[in-house]
Amino acid sequence: MWDLLFKTPILNILFLFYRILFSNMGLAIIALTLLFRVVLIPLTLPAMRSSKKIKELQPQLDKLKEKNKGDQAALAREQMELYRDHGVNPAAGCLPIFLSIPVMVALYQVLLQALDASALEVLNQKIYFDFLRIGGISQLHTFFLWLDLTKPDRFFILPVLVGVCQYLNSLLISPTLASDTKQSGKSGGGDEMAAMMQSQFKYMFPLMTTFITLRLPAGVALYWLVSTLFGIMQAKFFT
């Protein structure tokens, strides 16, 4: 069922782009990634807009924390009132984000398989139309710029770019930490721990992403980079 609903259609779209875009797998991966990011805009945009509104309300949230130190029930109540007055739903976009995850996971799995020479015969059996099938591994062109898309980037350029873009993306979509850290120092261990975890996540996730993409085929890292760049542009210009 997973293959039927997600992986096989995505595989066919990838091979269609490959045929259209001059048998260039790099361009096909970029086109496929952009297509799915555009399709998923209605699912991801509500969460990004909600995050931006919460970020704008951060000074008021800090005042509520200071006002209700030691009274978590009152703080929660006034926070919800603040969100309601400004039309913010903290849970907005959570369900759409969860709905988009299967598509992104399937896309990731398809790219891993499509860049595996040993899986080409199996993949051809899942192609809907004969003209999309790849006759043999010699007909599958996997070089793009300086990259062999089937192997990790030997110059480490792509993983570093992915990590930098992940960090920039986190700066755009997450609330600022400065006021949180300042406030947490006043209000006690719970807020301090939350601010510390948020700060660590902001730096650790890009580092983890860089480390992971060092070992992945460059084609998958290319997908990750394009997807993250699209997320940055979406956060910057559409929220």
Image (spheres, helix red, strand yellow):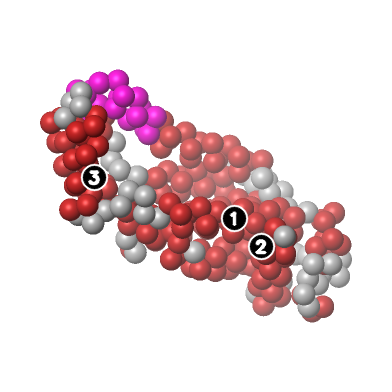
Which tag, 1 or 3, sits closer to the chain's start?
3
Q: Is residue 192 visible?
A: yes
Q: What element does badge 3 sit on?
A: helix
Q: Is residue 148 visible?
A: no
Give the labeled residue for mark 2. Answer: 6
In the rendered structure, which segment of residues is drawn in magenta? 182-199
Q: What element does badge 1 sit on?
A: helix
Three-letter residue code for mark 2: Phe
Q: Residue at image x 41%, y 49%? A: 169
User: Residue 64, which numbered label?
Assistant: none
Which tag, 3 or 2, sits closer to the chain's start?
2
Which quadrant of the figure has residue 4?
bottom right
Three-letter residue code for mark 3: Met
Which residue is at the front of the view, 40 or 113? Answer: 40
Tell me residue 178's x, y (percent).
25, 34
Q: CA distance from mark 3 to mark 2?
A: 38 Å
Q: Is residue 182 left or right of residue 199?
A: left
Q: Which residue extends farthest top?
A: 189
Q: CA distance from mark 1 to mark 3?
A: 31 Å
Which tag, 2 or 1, sits closer to the chain's start?
2
